[in-house]
């Protein structure tokens, strides 16, 4: 599978990574090479094969729906690049 | 170099228990070694003050008779484990300056058992790499040199390259690693040390920066098999905070190192004899078979027919999970932020500046294979292949107790070699990825030197939750190979 620049730009946008124009072409080549590599899986007939959902043979554990921590606002915010009044701050979203 | 740093963990433990040395003396010896060994670039963050505080506290505990199983042993921690109050970077610019307010379960278990933290070890960015060349904090140098070209700097393997190099160079007594597709076993092979990945679910993933959650598993990197068993005992255990942590008793791993493998059935998977495999590796593999024979084991030919599809399966599953896990690095809650005119622009700028090329490549592949219209063709297909690969192992284990294979298809290569083609780089993990996809325990034991004078490991792969057989056979390989004589430095 060969990816074109427009597709790479779209993937970059979906992945929320800004990719400058001059990097689209080299990235398209590298991603195409990876896709060519993984496409050998099409040689294998997988009709009727269950997809693996858990590598370990046990069902996912569930816990009671109760708060197990909390009251640690300072810790939660300790690494925030920007905080205002006890909240994470981001650029204005709604005009 | 101080003799103290040449002690294995088991030897240091015994010397401490006998009162022949103290944790402070041991820690000071390692801090001096770290300072003298900075050229390896094995550490992202050194924590000498904390190490000495922990060592003093350990010596005090010992005096009151409260010594834990790892009491006073100085260790390095891969910088993928969150450590409370100590910068944790995952080798990435985007997490530079991040100081966790919590401790990963595995490292907490080590401190609970008395270990001392020397610092945080370098790794490939977000554990994505097989040569420790993608770290934002620069490449790590393997302490080993090519016999005929000692000026070239060899890579230590990856992603746990800092851990492997630090153990081999005597900068730490042991280290934690994490293995997603071979990130413990392959660097162990490149650096001539022991690296063990336990069964998926044995070690809690809580507090470990996530790469591919269905594959990631922590494990020890040490100079001997016994040391791996000792560390593993502390690292493993049920953790209610990780929903995939297995609620199962942890056996005494050290007690299985009996050297007795009489009657054990060793499977030799024929598909691992890949085309163009260097003669060195084939020779060592045959040597390993002979060693196990001599110790009384039987060998049986087994087939793992889907082996060749493991790597392409991995390079769909792992990037898909990574693209999802790495979505949290958006500049809002922690790490670096690059401003933008809008929220979206801020995300995109932050991730552009914060991620290195390999990480961007994998996040984008993951995004693509999960995107509308491609999910079934790639991701679902890969999950089906994963079932088939897992079934291959289950069938092989009906005929044998453990599998013996080479760990890596080559010895370490030099910095700058093999870097142009991502797919060629991925082939480093061709022998380790299948067991990862099946969640199986595996160990790499240093078994000899290639014709270039660099170390080579042999890999043993076990049944789920049967680390004991892997360790028992690993101990036999180690004794037969005369492992200690290969120690670097």
Image (spheres, coloured by chain):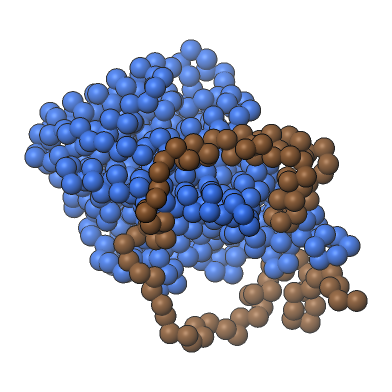
Chain colours: A brown, B blue
Left or right of B31 on screen, residue B450? left
Identify the image quadrant of residue B141: top right
Q: Residue visible at 23% across and 43% down?
A: B396
**Residue A49: x and y, percent?**
37, 53
Q: Residue visible at 31% across and 62% down?
A: A57
Closer to the camera, B62 or B405?
Answer: B405
Identify the image quadrant of residue B214: bottom left
**Residue B196: x and y, percent?**
35, 46
Q: Quadrant of the C terminus of chain B?
A: top left
Residue farthest front in this picture? A47
**Residue B259: x and y, percent?**
15, 40
Q: Quadrant of the N terminus of chain B?
A: top left
Left or right of B342 on screen, residue B78? left
Residue farthest top in this picture? B148
Q: Residue visible at 47% across and 49% down?
A: B382
Residue B212 to residue B310: above or below: below
Closer to the camera, B463 or B415?
Answer: B463
Residue B267 to residue B380: above or below: above
Q: Residue visible at 24% across and 24% down?
A: B287
């Amino acid at each position: 599978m060969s990816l074109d620049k427009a597709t790479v730009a779209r993937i970059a946008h979906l992945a929320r990574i800004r990719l400058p124009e001059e990097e689209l072409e080299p990235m398209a080549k590298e991603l195409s090479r990876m896709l060519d590599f993984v496409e050998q899986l099409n040689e294998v007939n997988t009709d009727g094969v269950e997809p693996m959902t858990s590598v370990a043979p046990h069902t996912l554990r569930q816990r009671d729906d109760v708060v197990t921590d909390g009251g640690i606002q300072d810790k939660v915010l300790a690494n925030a690049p920007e905080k205002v009044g006890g909240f994470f701050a981001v650029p204005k979203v709604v005009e | 170099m101080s003799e103290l740093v040449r002690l294995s963990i088991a030897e240091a433990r015994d010397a401490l228990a006998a009162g022949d040395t103290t944790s402070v003396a041991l820690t000071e010896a390692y801090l001096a070694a770290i300072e003298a060994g900075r050229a390896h670039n094995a550490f992202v963050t050194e924590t000498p003050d904390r190490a000495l505080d922990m060592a003093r506290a350990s010596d005090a505990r010992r005096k009151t008779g409260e010594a834990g199983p790892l009491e006073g042993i100085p260790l390095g921690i891969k910088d993928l484990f969150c450590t409370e109050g100590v910068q944790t970077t995952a080798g990435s610019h985007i997490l530079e300056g991040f100081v966790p307010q919590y401790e990963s379960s595995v490292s907490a278990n080590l401190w609970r058992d008395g270990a001392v933290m020397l610092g945080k070890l370098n790794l490939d960015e977000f554990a994505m790499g097989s040569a420790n060349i993608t770290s934002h904090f620069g490449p790590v140098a393997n302490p080993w040199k090519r016999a005929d070209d000692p000026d070239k700097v060899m890579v230590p393997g990856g992603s746990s390259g800092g851990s492997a190099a630090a153990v081999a160079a005597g900068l730490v007594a042991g280290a934690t690693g994490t293995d997603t597709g071979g990130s413990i076993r392959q660097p162990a092979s490149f650096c001539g040390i022991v690296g063990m990945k336990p069964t998926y679910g044995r070690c809690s993933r809580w507090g470990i920066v996530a790469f591919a959650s269905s594959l990631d598993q922590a494990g020890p990197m040490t100079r001997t098999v016994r040391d791996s068993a000792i560390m593993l005992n502390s690292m493993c255990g049920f953790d209610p905070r990780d929903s995939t942590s297995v609620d199962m008793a942890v056996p005494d791993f050290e007690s299985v190192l009996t050297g007795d493998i009489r009657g054990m059935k060793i499977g030799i998977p024929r598909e691992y004899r890949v085309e163009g495999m260097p003669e060195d590796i084939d020779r060592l593999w045959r040597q390993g078979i002979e060693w196990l024979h001599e110790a009384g084991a039987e060998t049986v030919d087994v087939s793992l027919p889907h082996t060749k599809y493991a790597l392409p399966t991995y390079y769909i599953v792992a990037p898909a999970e990574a693209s999802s896990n790495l979505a949290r690095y958006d500049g809002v809650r922690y790490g670096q932020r690059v401003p933008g005119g809008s929220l979206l622009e801020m995300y995109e700028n932050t991730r552009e500046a914060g991620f290195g090329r390999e990480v961007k490549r994998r996040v984008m592949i993951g995004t693509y294979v999960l995107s509308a219209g491609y999910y079934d063709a790639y991701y679902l297909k890969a999950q089906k292949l994963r079932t088939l690969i897992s079934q291959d192992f289950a069938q092989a284990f009906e005929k044998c107790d453990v599998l013996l294979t080479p760990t890596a298809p080559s010895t370490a290569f030099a910095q700058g070699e093999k870097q142009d083609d991502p797919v060629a780089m991925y082939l480093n993990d061709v022998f380790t990825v299948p067991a990862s996809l099946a969640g199986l325990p595996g160990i790499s034991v240093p078994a000899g030197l290639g014709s270039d004078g660099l170390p080579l490991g042999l890999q043993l792969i076990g049944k789920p939750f049967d680390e004991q057989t892997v360790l028992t056979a690993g101990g036999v390989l180690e004794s037969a190979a005369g492992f200690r004589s290969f120690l670097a430095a």
